Image (spheres, rainbow, N blue to C red):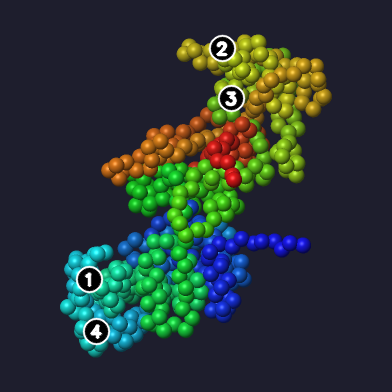
C-alpha cells in the first residue's frame, strides 16, 4: 500500500528539521500585534498560521501585545484584538501577555549591552542620526558619542531612565557596524526618552525600547521557538539575531518570514480606515464594507470561512494579491449547507389572489434547505394577500421572461399556480397592486400534473410579514479605477451602500437575533446586524450574493 504524501509548507519543513536536529523540544509560537488599531483579514492569516503550527506540533501559542509605543496604543484596541483572536478559535496558552510587562528586563538587557561595550548613549538629533546613517550605496559614519566609556554610558542611561533629560535629547544605540550593507545594522536606536502615559504601565517609565530591540527579547523571555513574521522583517532579521546572541540567551528563537496576504480592491491601511471613520464615511472600524476582522464578523462571515480562505491562499515566500471573490467563495461554501433558505421580499409589491377566500389561512410545509435534509422543514402561512418582489412582475415583458405578467401563469414557491388578471398603478405610473387567480388543484406536493409553468417566484404572506431594513453592499472602492487615486486619496465607490427600509420577511424571522444568518431565496446570504438591530426592528447585512465570479482550481 502506497504511503500518503503529505505536503508541507516551507515553515513546517524548517520546524521539522529543527526538531530532528534537537534544536527544539516543544514548539512555541506567538501572535504579537501592536494595539494601535483593529486587526484586518491579513492579520487573520498570521493568527491562524501561528496557532495552527503550535497545534500541529503539540506546542504552545501565545497572544502577546507589542505595546512599546504608547502614542498610538489604546485599551480599546487591546480588547478588540483579544475578541478577534478568540472568535477565530485561536486558543492561546495562559494569560494574555504584554511586552510592557518586560520593561524592567529590557532595561536590564540594555545595561548588559552597555557593560559589554555594545551600546552607547548618543546626543545626535533624529535628523543628524539619519544624516550619519548613510545610504544604500554609501556607508554611514560613526557618531561622535560612539566612544563614550562604559561608565559614562551607564550613568547617562540611568539618568535617562530617571527623567533628567528632555524628550528626544538622548537615545541609546546599539554599537554594531556603521559600514554594514544592511542599514538596520548601522548602530540602530534601541531606547528613546519619551514622557508618555502607557495604557498598561501608566507613568512608571519615561524611556521606551524600540520595537526591533524589544521584540527578540520578548520572544526569548517567553521561550518562543519560531518567530513567524511577514517579509518586511526579513532585513531586520540580522538585528534580531544580533540582539538574542549578544544577550546570550540559552535557547534563542528563530525568525522566519512569510508573505503577507494582499486582497485586491480593499482598504487595509490603518491611517486610511481611521480617516474613513473620523469623516463618517463608514460607521466605525467594524463597518461591514471594511475587511477588519470585526467588520467581517459583523457582516456575517464565519471563522470557518476565513480558515478555508487561508488554506486556499497557502503559505509562501513571495508576495502576491488574492481576489476578494475567493473570500466570498469561501463564505458561500461554508453557509450553503448550514443555513435555512427563507423567503424575503426586498422591493415589495402587493399581490392579491381574488378567488382565494378572504379569511382563509393555510400553512405550507417548506424544506429549510433542499441540499441538506438534516435541517428539516418549517411551515409558512399562505393567504389571499401576499408581497412579491417588484422584479417578478412586468407589464410588457421581453422574450424569455417567465415570471408574472398579464395573462401569464407562474408557481408561487411551495404553494399554488397563480395567473395574472389585472394590476393597479398610482398617479405616477408605479404598480401598486397585482391581481391574480389561483388554481386550488395545483398545491405543491399534491402530485398535480395537469400542466407546467416555466416560472416560480417567492412571496411573503402580507398579514404575517416581518418588516425589516436590509443593507446591500458593494466594494467600498471603485474596482474599475483601483483603490488609490494619483494624489494618494481613496477612490471611493458612491454606491457602496444601499439601504432598503421597506422589506418584508416571512413570519419565521420573528425570533431572529443579532448574528443569526440565513439565505434569502434568490437574493443571497444575510446576517442580522449586531449593532443597529433593535427589539422593534430587524436590520440585515448582505454577507454575499448567490453568484460567484471565482472558480476554485
Q: Is residue 251 above or below residue 421?
A: below
Instruction: Tell me how far mark 1 sits from mark 4, CA to CA.
Output: 22 Å
Q: Is residue 511 rendered to the left or right of residue 74?
A: right
Instruction: Tell me how far mark 1 sits from mark 2, CA to CA.
Output: 78 Å
Can you tell which mark lies on residue 389? 3
Residue highlighted by disc 2: 396
Mark 1 or mark 2: whose residue is earlier in sequence = 1
Q: Quadrant of residue 517?
A: top right
Q: Residue at x 47, y 75 (%)?
A: 253
- Of the 4 image quadrants, the one containing the N terminus is bottom right
Q: Are marks 3 and 1 in contact (CB under 8 Å)?
A: no
Looking at the rendered image, the disc whose residue lies closer to the viewer, 4 or 3, is 4
Instruction: Tell me how far mark 2 sits from mark 4, CA to CA.
Output: 88 Å
Looking at the rendered image, the disc whose residue lies closer to the viewer, 3 or 2, is 2
Q: Secondary structure at mark 2?
A: loop
Q: Residue at x 53, y 69 (%)?
A: 14
Q: Secondary structure at mark 4?
A: helix
Residue highlighted by disc 1: 140
Instruction: Tell me how far mark 3 sits from mark 1, CA to CA.
Output: 71 Å
- Residue 470, percent across and down? 52, 35
Amino acid at each position: 500500500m502506497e504511503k500518503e504524501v503529505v505536503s508541507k509548507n516551507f515553515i513546517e519543513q524548517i520546524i521539522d528539521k529543527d526538531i530532528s536536529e534537537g534544536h527544539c523540544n516543544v514548539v512555541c509560537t506567538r501572535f504579537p500585534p501592536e494595539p494601535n488599531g483593529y486587526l484586518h483579514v491579513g492579520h487573520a492569516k498570521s493568527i491562524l498560521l501561528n496557532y495552527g503550527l503550535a497545534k500541529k506540533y503539540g506546542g504552545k501559542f501565545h497572544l502577546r501585545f507589542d505595546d512599546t509605543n504608547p502614542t498610538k496604543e489604546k485599551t480599546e484596541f487591546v480588547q478588540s484584538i483579544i475578541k478577534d483572536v478568540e472568535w477565530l478559535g485561536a486558543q492561546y496558552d495562559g494569560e494574555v501577555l504584554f511586552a510592557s510587562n518586560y520593561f524592567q528586563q529590557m532595561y536590564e538587557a540594555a545595561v548588559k549591552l552597555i557593560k559589554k561595550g555594545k551600546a552607547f548613549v548618543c546626543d545626535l538629533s533624529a535628523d543628524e542620526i539619519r544624516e550619519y546613517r548613510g545610504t544604500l550605496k554609501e556607508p554611514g559614519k560613526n557618531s561622535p558619542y560612539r566612544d563614550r566609556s562604559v561608565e559614562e554610558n551607564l550613568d547617562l542611561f540611568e539618568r535617562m531612565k530617571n527623567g533628567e533629560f528632555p524628550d528626544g535629547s538622548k537615545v541609546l544605540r546599539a554599537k554594531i557596524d556603521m559600514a554594514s550593507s544592511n542599514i538596520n545594522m548601522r548602530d540602530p536606536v534601541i531606547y528613546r526618552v519619551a514622557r508618555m502615559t502607557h495604557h498598561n504601565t501608566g507613568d512608571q517609565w519615561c524611556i521606551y525600547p524600540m520595537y526591533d530591540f524589544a521584540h527578540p527579547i520578548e520572544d526569548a523571555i517567553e521561550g518562543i521557538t519560531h518567530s513567524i513574521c511577514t517579509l518586511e522583517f526579513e532585513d531586520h532579521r540580522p538585528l534580531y539575531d544580533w540582539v538574542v546572541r549578544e544577550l546570550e540567551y540559552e535557547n534563542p528563537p528563530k525568525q522566519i518570514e512569510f508573505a503577507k496576504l494582499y486582497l485586491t480592491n480593499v482598504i487595509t491601511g490603518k491611517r486610511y480606515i481611521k480617516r474613513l471613520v473620523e469623516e463618517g464615511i463608514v460607521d466605525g472600524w467594524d463597518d461591514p464594507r471594511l475587511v477588519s476582522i470585526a467588520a467581517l464578523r459583523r457582516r456575517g462571515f464565519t471563522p470557518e470561512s476565513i480558515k478555508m480562505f487561508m488554506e486556499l491562499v497557502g503559505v509562501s515566500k513571495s508576495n502576491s494579491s488574492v481576489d476578494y471573490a475567493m473570500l466570498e467563495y469561501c463564505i458561500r461554501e461554508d453557509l450553503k449547507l448550514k443555513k435555512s433558505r427563507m423567503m424575503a421580499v426586498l422591493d415589495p409589491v402587493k399581490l392579491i389572489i381574488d378567488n382565494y377566500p378572504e379569511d382563509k389561512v393555510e400553512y405550507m410545509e417548506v424544506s429549510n434547505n433542499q441540499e441538506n435534509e438534516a435541517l428539516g422543514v418549517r411551515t409558512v402561512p399562505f393567504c389571499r394577500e401576499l408581497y412579491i418582489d417588484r422584479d417578478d412582475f412586468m407589464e410588457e415583458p421581453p422574450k424569455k421572461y417567465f415570471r408574472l405578467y398579464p395573462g401569464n401563469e407562474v408557481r408561487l414557491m411551495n404553494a399554488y399556480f397563480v395567473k395574472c388578471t389585472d394590476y393597479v398603478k398610482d398617479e405616477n405610473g408605479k404598480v401598486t397592486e397585482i391581481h391574480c387567480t389561483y388554481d386550488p388543484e395545483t398545491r405543491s406536493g399534491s402530485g398535480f400534473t395537469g400542466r407546467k409553468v416555466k416560472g416560480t417566484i417567492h412571496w411573503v404572506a402580507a398579514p404575517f410579514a416581518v418588516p425589516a431594513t436590509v443593507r446591500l453592499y458593494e466594494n467600498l472602492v471603485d474596482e474599475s479605477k483601483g483603490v488609490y487615486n494619483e494624489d494618494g486619496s481613496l477612490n471611493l465607490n458612491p454606491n457602496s451602500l444601499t439601504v432598503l427600509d421597506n422589506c418584508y420577511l416571512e413570519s419565521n424571522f420573528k425570533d431572529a437575533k443579532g448574528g443569526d444568518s440565513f439565505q434569502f431565496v434568490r437574493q443571497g446570504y444575510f446576517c442580522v446586524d449586531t449593532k443597529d438591530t433593535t427589539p422593534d426592528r430587524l436590520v440585515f447585512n448582505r454577507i454575499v450574493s448567490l453568484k460567484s465570479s471565482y472558480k476554485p482550481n
